[in-house]
Amino acid sequence: MVHLSTELIHADDKDNRVTDVAPPINVATTFRYNNDDLIPWNDRENLDFMENEPIYSRLAHPNSTRLESLFSQILGGHAVIYSSGCSAFFAAMIHLNPKRIFMGQSYHGCRAIAHILTRNFDVKQHTLDEIEEFAQEGDVVHLETPVNPYGTSYDIQSFADRAHAKGALLIIDSTFAPPPLQNVWDFGCDIVMHSATKYFGGHSDLLSGVLVVKDEEACKKLRDDRIYLGTNIANLESYLLLRSLRTFEMRVLKQSENATKVVKFLFDNREKYNKVLNKIYHSSLQTEEFVKKQLKGGYGPVFSLTLQNVEQCKKLPSKLEYFQHATSLGGIESLIEWRALTDPYIDQTLIRVSIGCENADDLIQDLGNALQALQDEA
Ligand SMILES: *Cc1c(COP(=O)(O)O)cnc(C)c1O
C-alpha cells in the first residue's frame, strides 16, 4: 500500500496535462471542444470524459478533477468535491432525500440546512436518542465526531449498528479528525463528509467540502446533481487546496500532537486556574475504549473550555499573544473563539480553541499567562 504522504503528492500525477511540475492555475470557465471527438451529450454513457476534456467549469475543471483523484485515494472511496462543507452536506441531503434526519450536537450550519429542509419539504428532525423509536428505511443519521465545538468523540460503530438496524444510513462528518487521525470506514458508516476548508485547506484561505461514498454509481449521481446545484469548487480555490494537500499530513499530525500537549497542561493545572477554568472538553480526556480505537492516528486539534463567567470569556482572547480571536479551525495558526459570537445554540461561557502548527511550549506559556492574569483578577 502506498502511504498517505506519498499519495498526497502523487495521487493526481495521472491528471498531468502539461509538463509543469506545479499544476497550473486555470481560470477558464469554458474549454474548446475537441473537433475530432464530437459526441452528443445524449450519446455519452457517462461523464468520465470530462476528466480529460473539460467543457465548462461548473461541470468539472482540471484542478477539481485532480482533487477528486487525490481525495478518492486518501479518503478510501469515491470523492466528490464541493465549494464548501455546507454545500457538501446539502448535496448529500438532496441525493439521499430522507424523510427524517437524526442529528445530535453538530456544526450549526448543517443544522441550519436541516431547518431549511424542514421548512420547505417537511423533513422531520429527531435527536440521536430517537433512532429506535422513529427511524425508517432511507432515513439519515448524521453524526459528527469528534464533535464541534467540544472535540469529544461518539462511538461510530454503535451508531452505524443502530441506524442500519432500522434501514437508515449513517453520515459521518469527520472534519475534526481527518485521516490519518481517524478512518471512519472502519466503523461501518455509509457516507463521509469533510469541510476541506479546515485541515485539508489548512491555511484559512479557501472554502471547500468533500463527500466520499463507497459506491461508484452514487458518486456519479452526486457529480450529476452538482452540475445543476452549481456547487463545484471554484478554480482558484481548487489550486490552493491542491497546494495545501501536499503538506496536509505533517500539518495535521503536528496540530494533533500540540493540542494533546496543551490539553494535558490545562487538565494537569486546572486547580491552579480554578477561578477561571470550569470544564475542559477533548477526546484525549475521554476514558471510553472506542475513543482510542477511532482516533488511532492522534486526537483532533480542537478542544473547548467553559469559563466561570461571560466576562472572562470576553477577556481571555485579548490576553493571548499567539491565539487570534476568530472563528473557524484547522489552519496552521492557532485560533480561539468565544463561541457565543457565531453559534446560536451554544453554552454562553464556552471557548473553542483550534491548535495550529506553532511550538507547543510557546502556546502553553501563552495560555498559562492569560489564565494566570484572569485568575489574579478573580
Ligand atoms: C466548518 C464545518 C462545516 C461547514 O464547512 P464550510 O466549509 O464552512 O461550509 C461542517 N462541519 C464541520 C464539523 C465544520 O467544522
Image: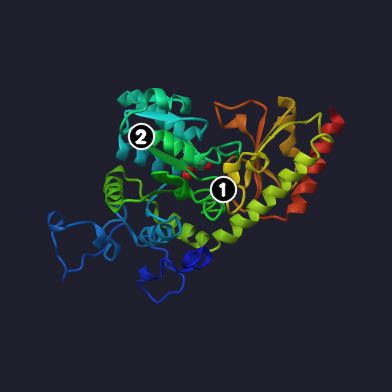
Residue occupying the point 32% across, 28% down: 99
Mark 2 burial class by Cα count in 10 Å: few <14, some 14-19, many 20+? many
Q: Which residue is mark 2?
A: 168
Alpha carbon separation for disc pair 2 and 1: 24 Å
Q: Look at label 1 and name its amino acid.
A: Lys
On the image, the x and y values in percent for residue 19 come to 40, 77
Residue in the foreground of this view, choosing between 171 and 352:
171
Q: Earlier in the sequence, mark 2 or mark 1?
A: 2
For image coordinates 69% across by 48% down, the residue present is 260
What secondary structure is marked by label 1?
helix
Question: Vertically, is 41 above or below 307?
Answer: below
Q: State the image coordinates of residue 92 (x, y, percent, origin top left).
A: 36, 41
Mark 1 highlights which residue? 293
Q: At x 43% / y 37%, what residue is drawn?
A: 161
Is there any visible trace of residue 111 in the rendered image?
Answer: yes
Q: Is residue 207 visible?
A: no
Q: Quadrant of residue 47?
A: bottom left
At horizontal 73% and vertical 25% (from top left) the residue drawn is 309
Q: Mark 2 or 1, which is nearer the eye?
A: 1
> What amino acid does circle 2 point to?
Ala
Residue closer to the observer: 241 or 32: 241
Total label count? 2
Q: Is residue 70 left or right of residue 348?
A: left
Q: For the residue labelled by badge 2, is the local secondary structure a helix, a strand or a loop?
A: loop
The residue positioned farthest toward the right in the image shown = 376
- Is residue 21 placed above or below 240 in the rendered structure? below
Task: Indicate the position of residue 132 as horizontal and vertical percent values.
Answer: 41, 26
Residue 52 placement, left or right of 72: left
